[in-house]
Amino acid sequence: MTDFEPNDQQQELIDATSGIHVVDAGAGTGKTFTITRRYANLLQQDETEPDDILLITFTNNAAAEMKERVVANCDYSMSALRDAPINTFHGHCHELLLRNGFSAPTHLGIDDRITSSTRLLENEVVEEDRFREFMSQFADEHPEHHDFLRVLRENTSLLEVIRELAAKGIFPTVDGWYRNGESYLDGDFEAFEELFEAANEPNEGANGPTQSDLRDGLSGFERGRCFLPDAPAESELRDNYPSIDHEWAERAFDEERDALKAFVHDIYFEYIEFALRQNYLNFSFLQMFAFVLLCEDHVLREAVQFDHVMVDEFQDTSEIQFKLALLLAGTDNFCVVGDWKQSIYGFQYASVDNIRQFEERLENYKRELNSDSERVAFPVDDVTEIKLEKNYRSTQSILDFSRHSLGLPATSNEEVDLDIEDDITPLTATTDHDHSNIEAFTSDDECEAILTRVQEIVGNRAYAVEDEDGELRPPSHEDIAVLTRTRRFGRELQSDAREYNIPVAYEGGVELFGTEQAILLLAWLRLLEDRHSERGWAVVLEEAGYTLDEVKAILENESYPSNMLSFRERLASGETVGGIARLVFDRYGFEDAYADALVAVLQGTFDSTTHNRGAIIRFMEQSLEADATHDVDDNPGGDSITVQTIHAAKGLEHPIVILANINQYSFPPSGGGADRIRYEDPVGLRQTKDYADAHGRPHIYDNWRYRILSKCLNRDYDEERRLMYVAITRAESHVLFSAGPSPSPLFENLPLEPETVEPDVEEAGTARTEQSRLQVSVPVPDIPAGQSPHSLMDDHVFSDADDGRGIEFGNQVHDFAEQYAEGAVVEPSNEDERHVAEFLDSLDGELRAEENAYLPVTVGEQQVTISGIIDLLHVAEDRIDIVDYKTDIGRHAESEYRKQLSVYYHVVRAAFRDYRVTTALFYTADGDRIKIDPLSKDEIADLIDRDYAEAQPDSEEDPIIR
């Protein structure tokens, strides 16, 4: 917009040089243009210098862009603005502490200091490793807290609790909690009571009131759970109809939590001490110490305050950042700019209510900060709202359609508050054309369907886009962006596109340590650390083309290939991790962005040659396990499709947007549930499990109070709807929605009629021709080298069945079972899933879902490997249970399922020789678990031999390759 004059609303903000302003800056309304023009205008005011204006934005890149735009619109040069306070919250807090924060820890009762050598630890994987080290020490020093530690699945989950508390401004001191922090931990009963009453409101049926959602949700309250003796019976809890008694709100909320708060306090406080001893701070601690310093040192606060404070992207700020902004404001020249509809960083503790309830929070935070001393001196009762309503990006059709996304149900039974429409500021397009196609399509192979649509769109005037002069032209690849909710789908799409030579540029975070480059580097590092590392040899030998049997023989005999041993010796002479990595990448011909990024990350993390290889290996393993992401410039250049996550696309625009993977468990994602100690508004600090020996035997009990509380705390899907809104409003001319065979309700509730696409992708550069069936003679081996357990089954038993419910239904139940076993927060959507949940809740051992199984079997003189996936492994103290889910209504196929389970039995039996192994089918329709006796390996081999013989074609016929 730099070539345009400001519109009336923009000019109003540019000219508003005094007072409190909250700006509703919708998508594409020229927010950055207006903010930088306002900044430049402030510099034109008498006695106003750059040091008098604090401009806070979301990223370092945005801050740099702001400076460039300001320079273009004022008399200051870039060198004059180099040190101007245009920064992020973390950046400004870091600078404040480096200059003034030496004694900041003492305000919390910590006898330590922040110095110029104190490092900012940005890598979360490295910090989690440090936190594990801390927790090991903490457990040794605090036996009084062992019962809480026994409840946790993973100790590092407490680091997430610490980060969340810090984002809300809840900090520990040596003898308690800073200021009013403990009140947040206790929760807000009045706010919870409102949620309780809403969930307990009777529903309206055809013949009068029916039971409330809360009463219905507490059905089966005791099933599959073990509560402490003070828990009520379900009959007592659900005694009334159609709602449960109101007394349960207070009884569930009121819980003795002093010991829990003491546990979290001690971990929180002592981890801050640990970090300071290790000479580092994380982002949370930067803001914490800056806030405490500004609260306690009144002279310093007044010295570092600004005449003007502007905060960009205010919808993505946390509660502590709102308070920091107030403390840094010396006058009421306080301006915040944002759009609540684009608040998509709740997972980073952003609070959308900062902008949605701006005036209320402004008054509350001033009152809270001034409770013992005046820290915010200016009045806050006069707030001016400015709305930027002209959109310079999208057509009116797209803008109007985008509003639908904010009211779409995200689940099959969610009721969306339609009053949200009242809070939406309508946007008006300024484009000369309104030629938009807004479409939806599905396919069994979504990636290939997207590529098919891309090939249909490129060069097609029906999807024309505007050129620089505003004229319409046919689109090219670079006009198209595919936006996804998750990185994984984007990477799959990129992989499929490469098979057809379709140019794709993936932009955004990549799970770098899961790439082939990282896996091979990790393998060689393991071999450097241990010459006989089986995990290392297995990877490098497989990459070299050795079969599984050959790898096994090499490992058993330790007869490693001489060329590989020579390369290992060559690696051993490397002095730095970067040097070792380059040698590995040169060996395999990796000269790409991923190899470069790995070298940069490892050298940046291990900048000294003194780090041992064990630490590097552990870092890479933990990064792989954590799905750690890093930005990689993986752009082939030229005319390429852009693939991005929605988060990475925020602030950008594309002529054509395809919003992809709007599928169940993907958009919205099923997510991983928090651990058993958690903080949640408005109920405060809670634990979902209790360790006790109430019945004379130590046991981890379910917390009955939390079970009631959780039924009132329904998952908030508003951010998922906002993500869809952000994706749609990236589009300038056209927007398409795609899903696979199991679309999510967000897709199904779109006001569109989806088209079914049959993939027909052609290799780039080739003409589209009619495909004919090709018949060729090929030599057929005596036995196929690889099979699945399903290939052993007789399909005739299924063809005669008329009670099946389809593959899609079976996949849905299996996906739910996997997510539930892994601890994700998912709710059953049908009776089958409810039976699965009750069954999993009844198991007290470790649950492993979707485990790969490989069984080598000798058939004649040939080795055959049968590979499959085990639905569930239940690892108990004395046995391993193999469970396979079946959605069949009848039992006609048990004899065939026995073959499948027999394969899994022998795989597990070999891996767990000291355990008793059982096999069972779990029929999800009625919740029955049927024990199955497995076949022997010889019987399995006979099945393979017999099945192959029956499947041989007549000698006169050629096999057909399609």
Image: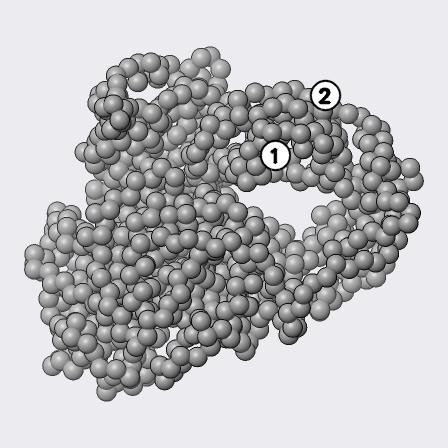
Q: Amino acid at mark 1?
A: Asp
Where residue 445 appears, as percent x and y from the top left, is: 58, 53
Residue at x 82%, y 36% (from the top left corner): 947
Residue at x 74%, y 24% (from the top left corner): 934
Residue at x 33%, y 39% (from the top left corner): 414
Query: In this rendering, is residue 546 above or below 947?
Result: below
Taking the image as drawn, is residue 790 in sight? yes
For the rendered model, the colour scheme is one colour
Q: Amino acid at mark 2?
A: Asp
Residue nearest the observer in this picture, 934 or 263: 934
Where residue 572 appears, as percent x and y from the top left, is: 73, 61
Where residue 406 appears, as percent x and y from the top left, is: 30, 52
Is label 1 in a helix, a strand or a loop?
strand
Query: In this rendering, is residue 268 above or below 904?
Result: below
Taking the image as drawn, is residue 305 in sight? no
How many numbered marks are there? 2
Residue nearest the observer in this picture, 459 or 685: 459
Q: Does residue 273 appear left or right of residue 418 in this picture?
A: right
Residue nearest the observer in this picture, 552 or 637: 637
Q: To which quarter of the image does residue 899 belong?
A: top right
What residue sits right under mark 2 in the picture? 933
Residue at x 60%, y 29% (from the top left corner): 802
Is label 2 in a helix, a strand or a loop?
loop
Residue nearest the observer in this picture, 511 or 52: 511
Q: Quadrant of the C terminus?
A: bottom right
Q: Does residue 492 appear left or right of residue 960 in this picture?
A: left
In the rendered structure, find residue 617 and report the number of the disc placed on it.
none
| C-alpha span from label 1 to label 2 | 17 Å
What residue sits right under mark 1 in the picture? 871
Q: Does residue 510 appear left or right of residue 687 in this picture?
A: right
Q: Quadrant of the N terminus?
A: bottom left
Q: Residues within 10 Å of mark 2 (few under 14, many from 20)?
A: few
